[in-house]
Structures are given as structure tokens and as C-alpha cells.
Image (cartoon, rainbow, N blue to C red):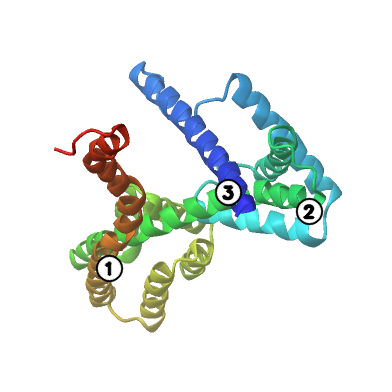
Amino acid sequence: MFILVIALIILSVFFITVGVVSMLQQHALTMKIKTGGGRDEFPEDEGLVKNIKNLALNAGVYISKKTQFGILKKNREVVQKKLKQSGLADKFNPNLIIGYQLLMAIAAILVSVLLLSIYNVILLLLFGICGWVAPILWLDGKVKKRQKEIFRQLPDSLDILTLLVEAGLDFGAAFNKLIEHETGPLINEFYLAQQEIKLGKNRHKALSDMALRVENKHLTSVVTSIVQSMQTGTSLAPTLRVLSDEFRVQRTQVAEEMGARAPVKMLFPMLFFIFPSLFIIIFGPIVLRLLLGGPLF
């Protein structure tokens, strides 16, 4: 139980740090936009954040050069995959995430020794592992969030594609129009596929590669149906219409399931935070009167 509490504390510190850094970067970006600086580039890190980032990057590069085999090589592949799935591959180098893993592992061990006076080697190893996996858990959260956003955006994007195709545009022109006028994680993936097509890749191959890169079962189903329709020469409009209706129903069902789970999720906060406060307010004066020997009423 003690180990679990410490692990949760370490993970909480990591996520709070990431959140604060993200808020500072977002504030810098907002100020840049307000002052007319544009938003073409991601705001540069400064001060302590920049120093930590450089240290993590150098550590990640060193680890990548020295370990081209075994578990660490597999870890790098996992990091690269999750960065692509989360849409952060253009903002974070895999070496940077690996460096953060190393720094978090060292920080977890130092906190355990200096603040908690823990010297057991096994416990220190466990804390180091908790620090090592913290950045991976953060990436997992980003991937799950992006997968949900893609699923929510899919029916609307299919509706637009259906209308454009039914209006007389071919799929390529409709695809380009959608990318030109819409935004979001799904549109970003469409844009990458579009760029690959412009560079000479076969359209079927570009769409299939997009589905493999995102690894979203709903998007994979859409791409498979579109590619099959193109290969067989059948009309795309009915296929897109059926897919749009199907995923809209699924999105509604998911929302209903989330609503049904809400009371269960509210149970523990109510038991541990709301009810104790109510009991203190209601019974606190009565208990004090009993302790002081006064009348109850």
C-alpha cells in the first residue's frame, strides 16, 4: 500500500509538471497571437524548462546511441509509435521522451532517498520503474484522447465527403475540399495522406498507411470500405452515406454509455469527499456538545 501511494505521488508530480509547462506554453502562444506574432511556430521554451529539455534530449541521444538492442530498443519503438498515434511526432523527438524517462527515474529514486529515507534496493528499483513509465503513461493519455477526438469527428467528416461526392466532385477533389475547410486531428491525418499522394504515392496505399499509422478501428473500417469501393468501381456516395449513419449511431451509443457510467464514477468522490463534509457539518456541533457536557438541544 505504501509503495502504491508513493508511486501515485510520483506520477502526480509528473503530470502536474507537464500540465504547468503546457499552460505556460499555451499562454506564450496566446500572447504571441495577440501581439500579432502569428502562430506558425510553437513557442520556444525558456529558462529552466529549456535547460531540462536540453538535458533530457542529450540523455535520450546518448541512450539511443549506446543501446541498439533489447528492451531499450523496444522502448524506443514504442515511444515512436505512440508519438505518431498522439499526433506529437512533429513536436517531440523520441530521444526527448526517452530522456524524460531517465530523468523521471532518477528523480523518483532521489525523492525516495532524500525525502522518504528509503534505502531498500528493491523499493528504490520499483520507484525508478514508476518514474521511467510516467512519460509513457502520459503519451498513452494523449493517444486515448486523440482516438476519441477522431471518433467524434468521423461522422461529420463523412457527411461532408458524402455531400461533396453527391454534388458531383470526385473523391480526390472532395478530399481536398474537406482538408481545406475543416480542422482537427482527423483532418491532420487526412492532410498527411494528401501530401503523400501529391508526392506520388498511390491513393489506396496512402489511405491504408494512414489507417495503420492511426490504429483507430473506426477509421480503419472507413478506409477499408473506401478502398474496396475504389477498387471495384462502385459509387462512393452510398458507401460514405452508410458509414456516416453507422458511426453516428455508434457515437450516440457511446455517449449514452458514458452517461450511464456517470453515477458509478460519482460514487467514490461522494463517499470520500462530500459525505464526510456533510457529516461534520451535521453531527459536529452535537459531538462537541457531548464532549463539553452541555445539552444536546
Query: Which residue does the image show at 72% across and 52% down from the upper left?
Result: 126
217 to 153, vertically: above or below: below
In-image side of 28 versus 13 (left or right): left
Q: Secondary structure at mark 2?
A: helix
110 to 154, vertically: above or below: above
Which of 151/6 is in front? Answer: 6
Corner quadrant of residue 48: top right
Regarding residue 173, the answer to whether it shows in the image is no
Q: CA distance from mark 2 to mark 3?
A: 16 Å
Q: CA distance from mark 2 to mark 1?
A: 42 Å
At which x and y percent is residue 174? 29, 59
Circle nearer the viewer, 3 or 1:
3
Query: Which residue does the image show at 41% across and 20% down from the upper left?
Result: 37
According to the picture, the residue beneath numbered tag 2 turns out to be: 122
Would you say the residues marked 2 and 3 are in contact, meaning their CB atoms lie under 8 Å apart? Answer: no
Q: Looking at the image, is mark 2 or mark 3 earlier in the sequence?
A: 3
At which x and y percent is residue 248? 23, 68
| Amino acid type at mark 3 | Val
| Amino acid type at mark 2 | Ile
Sort mark 1 into few (<14), some (14-19) or many (20+) by Cα contacts within 10 Å.
Answer: few
| Amino acid type at mark 1 | Glu
At which x and y percent is residue 219? 40, 67
According to the picture, the residue beneath numbered tag 3 turns out to be: 5
Residue farthest top in this picture: 35
Circle nearer the viewer, 2 or 1:
2
Which of 118/277 is in front? Answer: 277
Query: Which residue does the image show at 32% across and 65% down from the upper left?
Result: 171
* Disc marking residue 257: 1
At which x and y percent is residue 232? 38, 84
Q: Secondary structure at mark 1?
A: helix
Q: Looking at the image, is mark 2 or mark 1 earlier in the sequence?
A: 2
